[in-house]
Amino acid sequence: MTNPPEERLRARQGRRTIAAFETYAEAERAVDYLSDRRFPVERVAVVGHDLVMIEEVTGRLTYAGSALRGAASGAVIGALFGWVVGLFDWIDPLITGLLLAERQNRPSESRPH
């Protein structure tokens, strides 16, 4: 997929290049350096050449924030899994009750004595 020149121009408008790096890892280290010195990294973007994607930096990720996001992700997965198990737990007695009711309504000669 190619990026037309108009889109590249729109992506660059309002941006100023403050540094250029050969690799993404170097650019990431520079953003970490700025963040460690309390620079507002929310206004920083890492832009690659001839790429479709521009990475917008949203802020510093702390251990507490990372743990909170991981806990929230686990809670959502657990809730969905619990909902599915609960759904089957609700359906199983219903099916069992219907099967027992059908067996109960059979003629008496088919029942063992």
Image: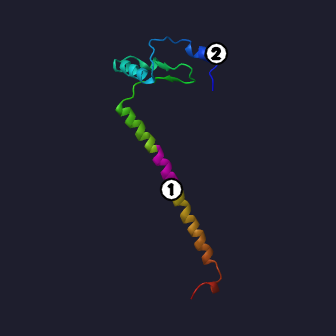
Q: Secondary structure at mark 2?
A: helix
- In terms of depth relative to the viewer, which is nearer, 25 or 32? 25
Q: Comparing marks 2 and 1, which lies closer to the viewer?
A: 2
Across and down, in percent, residue 93 comes to 54, 65
Q: Please state, as top left, top right, bottom left or bottom right, where the C terminus lies in the image.
A: bottom right
The spot of residue 38 in percent (x, y) is 35, 18
Residue 32 is drawn in which quadrant?
top left
Position of residue 99 in the picture relative to residue 61 (left or right): right
Read off the magenta span.
Answer: 76-84
| Residue 83 drawn in magenta | yes
Looking at this view, name the residue that lies furthest to the bottom.
Answer: 113
Q: Position of residue 60 (x, y in %)?
A: 39, 25
To which residue does mark 1 refer? 86
Q: Residue 105 versus residue 33: which sits nearer the camera? A: 33
Snapshot quadrant of residue 63 = top left
Q: Does residue 105 sit above or below 43 in this rendering?
A: below
Q: Residue at left 63%, top 16%?
A: 5
Q: Amino acid at mark 1?
A: Gly
Looking at the rendering, in which quadrant would you find the N terminus?
top right
Q: Is residue 83 above or below residue 105?
A: above
Residue plotted at (48% across, 19% down): 45
Q: Position of residue 84 (x, y in %)?
A: 52, 53
Q: In the figure, is residue 42 to the left or right of 103?
A: left
Query: Considering depth in this image, is 29 or 91 the residue closer to the camera?
Result: 29
Q: Mostly what secondary structure, the magenta segment?
A: helix
Q: What residue is rendered at 38% in x and 32% in y?
A: 65
Identify the residue under disc 2.
Answer: 6
